[in-house]
Image (cartoon, rainbow, N blue to C red):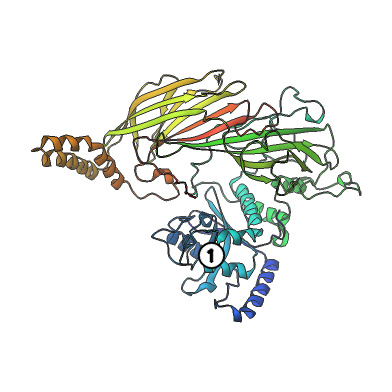
Amino acid sequence: MPGDCSIRALWILNNLDAVVFSRRFPVVEKRWRAACQSENESSDDDPVKYTVFSSVPSDSELAAAFSERKTREGSVRGFGIRVSQSREGSDSWVDDPITRHIVGVYINKEEEGENNLMWPLALHIKGPYCILILPLVEPRHVKAYARLCKRSDCGNAVTAHENLSSLLLDLPSITGAFMVAHALGDIVTGDVVEPEVVVSQSPSVGGLLDSLTGSIGISGISSRAKPVAAPVASSTPAGAAAIGALASDVPKSGSRLLDKDALRSFISSAMPFGTPLDLSYSNIFSVRANGFSSLDIPPQDLKQPAWKPYLYKGKQRLLFTIHETLHAAMYDRDEIPDSLSVSGQINCRAELERLPDVSFPLTGLSTSKIEALSFHPCAQVPEQNVDKQALMFSPPLGNFVLMRYQATCRLGPPVKGFYQLSMVSEDEGAFLFKLHLMEGYKSPLTMEFCNVTMPFPRRRILSFDGTPSIGTVSNAEHSVEWKIITSGRGLSWKSIEATFPGTVRFAPWQMQRSTSFRSVCEGITDDDSDNETENTNNMANTEEFLMEKMSKDLPPVDLEEPFSWLAYNYAKVSFKIIGASLSGISIDPKSVTSGDYILWNTLGKCPSAVTAKV
């Protein structure tokens, strides 16, 4: 937990922007008011004459302010960059994507002026809920952000006297606020599970490392449904649902009731008086369920950390699991480069007696192109030395994430190719896939499964025609799924080429849209009937008219669903590879990698980021 982190208040809102749970911490709020009074008394020399909002709003005031911000910013998270709709004083005016996660609201908007700005609020969306955490910062930090919201220029220029990045670096409490938000999100949605650590059936290394294994789940991390004081390692294989880049930020609708008693119990134990201590739900659950006995009292010579309330007794072993996900966007266009990135984590389970310090060797950390690293609070990591090959940590009980990282893919993409979709009429499209799987990949890498999904969120599928060169095809109301490699029939030692041509038919548009489409086509032929050359050219552009017309007819789309903008269309590829990591980081050779791919329609529109030229 980041040092000196205190929480003033927290709120949980449903998808109707109503507060369903809140908690305020008077001890922390007293410190905030004292700081505000001191700041206001010394503000005579401040060229910016205003005071900060010095009290925590009521639930109704917060709900109204959050709803107003959502309307002002265009969505729950907001634009994140300055656009034509941005207004001076808003988050998007700051022109920094981090404002989609660290937000500010104006309480009692009828009172104009900066003194009603409440910032920073850590925003986390989980299931149907929006979780807002208000950490304690100094009033001068709020004033600094208010000045950024009024600045005429935009962006996060390094040469700027004040910028959001430098401001946030001075606020470690925001990191703690997000940790609290994620912990609460897991509780309200019932996702209080520990990371999976897969146990090998046969020993791989002797001694404490007799069950050193590697695995990954494409659906994220899974484990036992209920935490206990001294749990047994899970051997449940991971799920097979896709994760990552396509997850929407819009709160999902759901029927699960909010367990307010569980929230109150967790908050009172995990963060008494607003100071987060241990946010491990399994630890808190174990202590409440089992209590302590005389056997649980540690020896006087040991200093027991908060993350390990019980000492382990029994057969000792140390287990690790590497989980990596490859995120890719494939365009098949000369002007737009493909995007590849790897996100991973190392899960650990240490069943060790007493409180030993464990030295954890990593292979490939210095040679892999690591872009970001973060560690569990129990780890001791030398600063400014990301190439160090060994980590020292004092492990807690149960399964935990020792390290998270982002890296580049040292190999080429395991799935290459293109996807093309052409609308031959308003209600029918012709598509073509041509993919190469595992090209350049050798043993011990094995692809266990590979699926391709064509989503059509705004069109209802009536039927499709087409036979792939390999695999099976099925369709739902709004998608077509192509299972190239199914579980149990893995691909190893060789690469294959898979093709899938076909057509898909949609339910008709509303009558006025069909009429409008016919008038477009009739207008093309009638207006140009006297000029054969012009007629031919215009008929060649019929598809462009179709796509433009369909784009105009599409209903408004929330910005939180970027892959439904206008007529953008894409296919999603998910797969699972076992045998090694793609980043180069490894513990033993049995690591596994999953994939989260986007294949953009080569013939259609597509969003892409432009690399700045320095």
Q: Can residue 57 be seen in this view?
A: no
- Judging from the image, what secondary structure is the residue with disc 1 in? helix
In percent of the image, x 62 and y 50: which residue is there?
182
Q: What residue type is labelled 1?
A: Leu
In percent of the image, x 47 and y 28: which residue is there?
416
Q: Report x, y in % for residue 13.
A: 54, 56
In percent of the image, x 43 and y 65: which residue is there?
87
Q: In the rendered image, which quarter is residue 12 located in?
A: bottom right
Q: Residue furthest bottom?
A: 44
Q: Which residue lies furthest to the left in this view?
A: 530
Q: Report x, y in % for residue 407.
A: 60, 39
Q: Report x, y in % for residue 599.
A: 43, 34
Q: In this view, does 401 lie to the left or right of 447?
A: right
Q: In the rendered image, which quarter is residue 165 located in?
A: bottom right
- Which residue matches tag 1? 62
Q: Which residue lies furthest to the front in this view?
A: 614
Q: In this view, does 34 lie to the left or right of 498?
A: right
- Is 499 located above or below residue 402 in the figure? above
Q: In this view of the protein, which residue sits in the foreground, 609 or 557? A: 609
- Is 134 located above or below residue 383 in the figure? below
Q: Is residue 476 left or right of residue 538?
A: right
Tag count in the figure?
1
Q: Can residue 521 be seen in this view?
A: yes
Circle 1 residues within 10 Å: few <14, some 14–19, many ≥20: many
Q: In this view, does 300 lie to the left or right of 236?
A: right
Q: Report x, y in % for residue 261.
A: 65, 53
- Is 94 located above or below residue 113 in the figure? above
Q: In this view of the protein, which residue sits in the foreground, 132 or 361? A: 361
Q: In this view of the protein, which residue sits in the foreground, 336 or 484? A: 336
